[in-house]
Amino acid sequence: MDNRIKDLREDHDMTQQQVADKIGITQRKYSYIETGTQPLTDEILVALSKLYNVSIDYILKQTEVPNRYKK
């Protein structure tokens, strides 16, 4: 999961700080999530799904199809 999160961030040409600011957490916490040191909360998972416009299943590697986020 951590690699998918990093890949999404890099695909969107964003820094860890930019993503952290957009989802309302510190860069340090985001770094821990991206490296797998800290687990994803439901709130952060939803925020990342919205930010990158992909399904939660895609972030969790339960599918290889990004399926756009649905409200």
Image: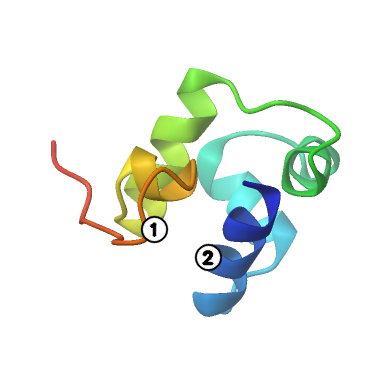
| Crowd class of label 1 (few under 14; some 14 to 19; many from 20; radius 10 Å) | some
Image side of residue 44 versus residue 63, left or right:
right
Asked if marks 1 and 2 touch (Cβ < 8 Å), the reply is yes
- Residue under numbered circle 1: 52
Q: Secondary structure at mark 1?
A: helix
Q: Residue at x 73, y 48 (%)?
A: 34
Q: Is residue 18 above or below residue 48?
A: below
The colour style of the image is rainbow
Q: Amino acid at mark 2?
A: Leu
Mark toward the start of the polypeptide (1 vs 2): 2
Q: Residue at x 58, y 34 (%)?
A: 24
Image side of residue 66 versus residue 4, left or right:
left
Nearest the eye: 53 or 1? 1
Nearest the eye: 70 or 26? 70
Q: Amino acid at mark 1?
A: Tyr
Image side of residue 60 versus residue 65, left or right:
right
Q: Position of residue 21 (x, y in %)?
A: 61, 47
Cα distance in 3D space between marks 1 and 2: 7 Å
- Residue under numbered circle 2: 8
Q: Residue at x 69, y 67 (%)?
A: 15
Nearest the eye: 32 or 24? 32
Q: Which quadrant is the C terminus positioned in?
A: top left
**Location of residue 65 by image quarter:** bottom left
Q: Residue at x 66, y 61 (%)?
A: 6
Q: Position of residue 59 (x, y in %)?
A: 46, 47
Q: Secondary structure at mark 2?
A: helix
